[in-house]
Image (cartoon, coloured by chain):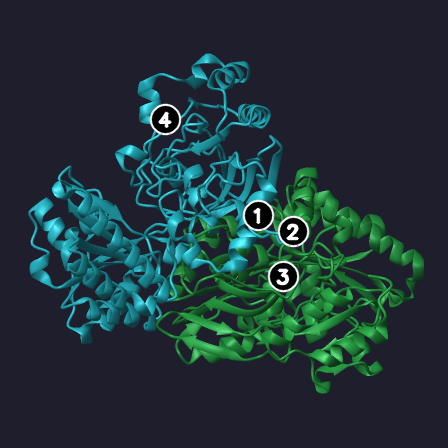
Chain colours: A cyan, B green
Amino acid sequence: MSGVDRQQVLHRLSQVLPPEAIATDEATLDAYATDHGPTADWEIQRALAVVFPTSTDDVVALMCASAEEGFAVVPRGAGTSVSGGAHALRDAVTISLERMNQILSIDVEDQTARVQPGVINAELGQTVEQHRLMYAPDPASYRISTIGGNVATNAGGLRCAKYGVTRDSVLSLEVVLADGTVLRTGTGTFKNVSGYDLTGLFVGSEGTLGIVTEITVRLRPLPVAEETASVFVEDLETAAAGVLAISQAGVQPAILEMMDGATMAALDAAHGSNLAGLGGACLLVQTDGYGAAAEMDAIRDALAPLGAQVSPPGDERARSLVELRRHARGDDTVTDIRVGEDVAVPKSRLVEYVREVQRIGRDHDVKIKVIAHAGDGNLHPSFWIDVDQGTAGMARLDAALDESIQVALEMGGTITGEHGVGSYKVRWFNREHDEPAIWVQRELKNLFDPEHRLNPGRAIA
Amino acid sequence: MSGVDRQQVLHRLSQVLPPEAIATDEATLDAYATDHGPTADWEIQRALAVVFPTSTDDVVALMCASAEEGFAVVPRGAGTSVSGGAHALRDAVTISLERMNQILSIDVEDQTARVQPGVINAELGQTVEQHRLMYAPDPASYRISTIGGNVATNAGGLRCAKYGVTRDSVLSLEVVLADGTVLRTGTGTFKNVSGYDLTGLFVGSEGTLGIVTEITVRLRPLPVAEETASVFVEDLETAAAGVLAISQAGVQPAILEMMDGATMAALDAAHGSNLAGLGGACLLVQTDGYGAAAEMDAIRDALAPLGAQVSPPGDERARSLVELRRHARGDDTVTDIRVGEDVAVPKSRLVEYVREVQRIGRDHDVKIKVIAHAGDGNLHPSFWIDVDQGTAGMARLDAALDESIQVALEMGGTITGEHGVGSYKVRWFNREHDEPAIWVQRELKNLFDPEHRLNPGRAIA
C-alpha cells in the first residue's frame, strides 16, 4: 500500500463523494484513528481521509476508486472494536458506515428487519419491541455499537447461550466486493441451503472480504417475562458445579455469567457495595419467557445442595448486577493500563482456566480479574498494571497475555470467542490454526481481495 | 472425468483399502446407485465401485488415489438425500461413510459430542438422552440418516424454528480435502470468531468441497416437558393468522407445522381417520421445556378468537399426528410418480404460496398436497401424477414444478430450505442466484476442488 499518492487519492475521493462526506481535518483524523482496542501511542496511525458514504452506490464508487488508485480501505461502524479491527492505517481511507443508519423495513409477520450497517443495535431492539419482537444479539456495547460492526465481528453477548450469536440472527447480506461488485447473499427466509453459505462467510470476516451495506436479520418473539437472580457461592469450583447443575436440571438460561472475587472487589470499590463479603464467586442468572419463573425455581432447587445463596424473586440488586455486568470492564481509570481478553474454552475447563490465569497473574506480577459467559465457556479476563510501571511493566503484561492465550489453546480453546482477531490478536492467529487452516484462510482472502485493499492485516495472519 | 480406466482405478483402490472395504458386485452397485431423490430409470448410473472406509486415514488414501488417477468420488451417508446429492456417477467411486459410525466421545459438562460421520442421528439422540441432553436437529429421516449426511445438506427438521438447523449445532469439523490434506475447522467451544467461518462453509456443501470425517456437535439440555396440540381451522388463511397470533403472544414453539386439506385427506385414506371433516387446514404445535404448559395455554388464548378447535391437554391424537407428520410424505405407492418440493418463502407469504401451488396443480392437471414448517416458512408441497400418464404426464409434472419454483423465487424465497440442491435442483440454481453470487460459488468450488473430483455437478450449477 505504500506508494499511494495522498493528493491523488483525495482528488479521486472528491470526484465520487460530495464534500460533506469527506473529512481530512486533523480533529476528525484523530477521532477516527483508533477504536476501543489496545494500542500504544507510537502505533497510532491517521488515515488519508475519513469518508462517510450514505448509500450502497457511494460504497461502490469508493471501492472502484480504491481499485483504480490502489489505496486500501478500513471499514468502520461505531469504532467499538476491542481488538483494533477498525484502527486507521496511514496509507488507507477509513470508510465510516455510521451515516448509513436507516432501518429500511420491519416485517412483523416475517419476523425480519432489513437495516443499513450503521443502525445502532439498541435502536433496532427498541424499535421492534413495540411489535413484541426482539433482536437477540446483545454485545456489551449494544447501546453504542452498530449492527454492521456486530456482523463484522460476529458479535456475541450475554444472551447468546440461549439465542445464538450474531450469525444466528443474520439471514441475508448485501456486500460490496473489492472491485465494486455488489453481491447479495441468502434470502429473507429463515432457511436456505441453496449453494455455499456465503452469508456465514462474510459474518465475522471483519471487513476483509467485502463491505456489508445491508443486512436482513431474523427477529424473535419478545419474551413475556424475565427472572433474574444472583448466586453467591464459596468459590469458583462451586460456581462451576452450579453451572453443570443448572444444565442437568434441563434449563437453558438466557444469561449465565460468572464473576470472580477480584471482579466483585472492583465493583465494591466502584459502587460502595459489599459483594466480596457474600462469597468467593458469583453467578448471575436470567431466565425468560413463559417458563421464566418455573426455570428459576428449578435452578434454586438445583443449587440448594451447593450451599449457594440465591437472591429472592424480584430482587433489585440481582437486576442491577446484570446491568453492572454489562459494564464490568468499563471501570478503567487513567491510572492503569488494561487489556481485556476474550478466549473461549470447552465449558468443563472454565474454572481450571480461571485458576491458571490467576497463577499467570501472580507469576508475572500483573493484576487479574475474570468475568465469564459461563453458559458458553467464553471468558473475559482483565489484565492490568499501574501506568507508572513503564516498559518493564508492559513486558510483564505482554508475557502474561501470551501465556494466557497459550493455556487456552492447550485446553482446546480459541484466541477469540466474540471480539474478533482485529489487529491486536493477529500475533496469536497461527498458534490456533494449523497449516491447512491457515492456507485455506489465506486463499479465501486472496480470492475475494487479491490486492489486499480491504482492511489489510486484520482478521487473519 | 471420462477417460478413467476402470481396471486401473480398481487396482489402485485395492492398494489402499482391504478387500472387504471394496464392493464391485452388481447387487451392491445397484443398491448404491440412487438415493431417495427423484430419478428416471434412464438416468440411473452405477459407480465404478463402492468403498467403505473405516478411518480418516482410509479417506485420505482414497482422495490421494483420486488425485493420482483422476477419478471423481461421490460421498454418501445413509443415502437418504431427496435431492439426488448421493446418486452414483458412472465414472466415479462412491465413498460410503456408513462404517465410520462411532460416537467418539460425549462430554456432558461441555455439552458436546464428537462423532464419526456415519453415526445415525437418532442413535446420537438416544445416547445423549441418558445424560439429560438432546441433539436438536431432527430431519424427518432422523431414524435412518447420518450426522455426516445431515452436515452435508445442513439438514433442518421439525424443531429447527426453535433450536436451529444442523449448522447451529456443529462446532467443529475434520475434513479431507481434494488432495488428501486433513483440515480441522473450529474448536470444541460454543463460540469462536478466529478467522473465517470454515465450519459454516463446509456445512451444507454437499460433499463438493471436501469429505467430512469427524464432527463435534453442540448438545442442549433435554426439555423436561412437552405439550402437543392439534389445531383445526376453517382454512389456510385462518391457519396463517394463527401462526402470527402465536408469535405475537410471545411463544416460540418447538414444532409448528401446517397441513392443507389434501394432506389431511391423504392421511385419512391411509389411516381411516376423519381429519378432513374437522376443518380445511390444520396446525400441529408442540411446546417444550419448563414453560411448555404455560406456552400452550397462551397459544389456546391466542387462537380462541379465530374459532380454532384446539385439542385438549394430553391429547393422544395430537401426539400421533406429529408422528404421522414425520412420515407424511412416506405414503407413496407404486401407482403414482411423486416429487416432494422444499422451497422456503418469507413467513408472511406462506398461504399465498400454497394458494399459488394449488392453482399451478389445477393449471397443469397435477395433484398437489402441501405441508409446511410454518414456524420458519419452509414448505414441502408434493406434486404427483398417476404412473400410467407417460411422457405427457411427466412433462406436465415438470412444468408444474418449474412454475412452483419460479413463484417461490418471485416471493423472495429459495429453491431449497433444507434438502439441498443435490443433482435434482441444479437446473434451478441460476434462477435464485445472480451473476456475482454464481461467480463466487464457482470460485469457491475451484479453490477447494480445482479438478472437480468431489461430487461433481452437485450443490451448485
**Marks 3,2: beta carbons within 8 A:** no
Q: Give the residue displayed 13% in from the left and 39% down from the top.
A: A335
Q: Which residue is mark 2?
A: B447
Q: On residue A444, which mark appears?
A: 1
Q: Chain of mark 1?
A: A
Task: Tell me the element at label 2.
Answer: helix
Task: Give, as a three-letter code, the residue at label 3.
Answer: Thr
Image quadrant where residue A36 sits = top left
**Residue under label 3:** B153
| Callouts 4 and 1 close, C-beta under 8 Å | no
Evaluate whether label 2 is on the same chain as label 4.
Answer: no
For residue A46, the mark is 4
Q: Earlier in the sequence, mark 4 or mark 1?
A: 4
State the residue lying farthest toward the bottom: B20
- What is the three-letter code of the residue carrying label 1? Leu
Specify the subunit that label 2 lies on: B
Task: Give the amino acid type for the residue marked by disc 2 in the picture.
Answer: Leu
Q: CA distance from mark 3 to mark 2?
A: 20 Å
- Residue B80 visible to an observer of this rendering: no
Residue B256, percent across and down?
A: 53, 59
Q: Left or right? Give the position of A264 relative to B79.
A: left
Q: Is residue A2 above or below residue B443?
A: above
